[in-house]
Image: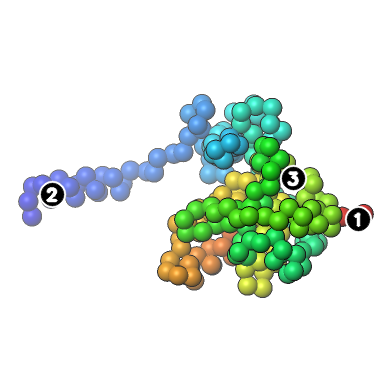
């Protein structure tokens, strides 16, 4: 073995012994915990990692350049959505999230091996869904989305923080294998939704009107 190879392996061993670099706040540089907060810059849909102190400087209502993403989602066990209504929304797969942007426009995205993919959305079908599920009118633009899991027999619905939605996108993009995604990826998706349900409060999804 040459001296060059010896030096390369020594450098690799040193790198493996080093602890992973801590993630830091994009504003003040403070070290971040694993479950840290996020802001979103609406127009480029860019998430910014921040510490609790910096997050407190922002709200979710759009009075500043950045909006604070809520920490907790809401599970919707009573959400009303028939198969026919889902088909009328024209979203091609059973995983998707729908939110309003800063201009009030509806945006529907679904995860894919290439990242978030935008789907056309039938506005009339959405308005019908709002009439049956008043909670949709309470979603805060840019920072909350209706997150839908209709994969296989699953029928799960959440008002989810937008960072959780993009976390799902990243999970699909990095773990997709072959033509169908692979068994491991679908197991990770099941675990993602199980964890989201545990972290979410339950609320009624249907309107009493």
Q: Marks 2/1: CA distance?
A: 72 Å
Q: How crowded is mark 2: few (under 14 residues within 10 Å), some or many (20 or more)?
A: few
- Measured as percent of width and height from the top left, residue 52 is found at 61, 33
Which residue is labeled 1 in the image? Answer: 208
Residue located farthest toward the left when viewing the structure as drawn: 2
Is there a contact, CB below 8 Å, between mark 1 and mark 3?
no
Of circles 3 and 2, the one toward us is: 3
Q: Quadrant of the C terminus?
A: bottom right
Q: Examine the rendering and report whether any part of residue 198 can be seen.
A: no
Gap in Å between the C-alphas at discs 1 and 3?
A: 17 Å
Give the CA separation, mark 3 to mark 2.
Answer: 58 Å
Q: Name the element at disc 1.
A: loop
Q: Is label 2 or label 1 in front?
A: 1
Q: Is mark 2 on a helix, strand or loop?
A: helix
Q: Residues within 10 Å of mark 1 (few under 14, many from 20)?
A: few
In the depicted structure, whether residue 102 falls above or below residue 76: above
Question: Residue 119's spot in the image, x, y percent?
Answer: 60, 55
Foreground: 77 or 104?
104
The picture quadrant where one finds residue 90 is bottom right
Please tell me the numbered disc located at residue 6.
Answer: 2
Mark 1 vs 3, N-terminal side: 3
In the rendered image, residue 126, in percent from the top left (x then y), is placed at: 75, 55
x 30%, y 48%: residue: 16
Q: Which of 168 and 1 is in front in this view?
A: 168
- The answer to whether the residues at label 3 and label 2 have Cβ atoms under 8 Å apart is no
Locate residue 69 relative to residue 187 in the image: left or right: right
Q: Which of marks 2 and 1 is nearer the N terminus?
A: 2
Residue placed under numbered mark 3 in the picture = 139
SS of the residue under disc 3: loop
Which residue lies at the image location 61% right of the left edge and 28% below the top edge? 65
- Judged left or right of residue 14, residue 153 is right
């Amino acid at each position: 073995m040459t001296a060059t190879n010896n030096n390369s392996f020594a450098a690799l061993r040193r790198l493996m012994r080093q602890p992973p670099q801590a993630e830091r706040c994009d504003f003040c540089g403070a070290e971040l915990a694993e479950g840290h907060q996020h802001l979103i810059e609406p127009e480029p849909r860019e998430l910014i990692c921040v510490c609790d102190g910096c997050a407190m400087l922002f709200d979710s209502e759009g009075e500043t350049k950045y909006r604070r993403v809520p920490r907790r989602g809401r599970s919707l066990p009573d959400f009303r959505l028939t198969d026919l209504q889902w088909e009328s929304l024209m979203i091609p797969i059973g995983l998707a999230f729908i939110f309003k942007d800063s201009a009030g426009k509806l945006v529907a995205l679904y995860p894919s091996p290439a990242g978030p993919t935008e789907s056309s959305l039938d506005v009339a079908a959405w308005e019908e869904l709002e009439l049956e599920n008043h909670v949709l009118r309470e979603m805060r633009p840019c920072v909350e989305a209706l997150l839908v899991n209709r994969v296989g027999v699953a029928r799960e619905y959440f008002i989810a923080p937008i960072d959780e939605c993009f976390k799902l996108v990243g999970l699909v993009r990095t773990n997709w294998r072959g033509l169908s995604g692979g068994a491991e990826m679908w197991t990770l998706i099941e675990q993602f939704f199980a964890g989201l349900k545990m972290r979410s409060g339950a609320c009624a999804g249907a309107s009493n009107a």
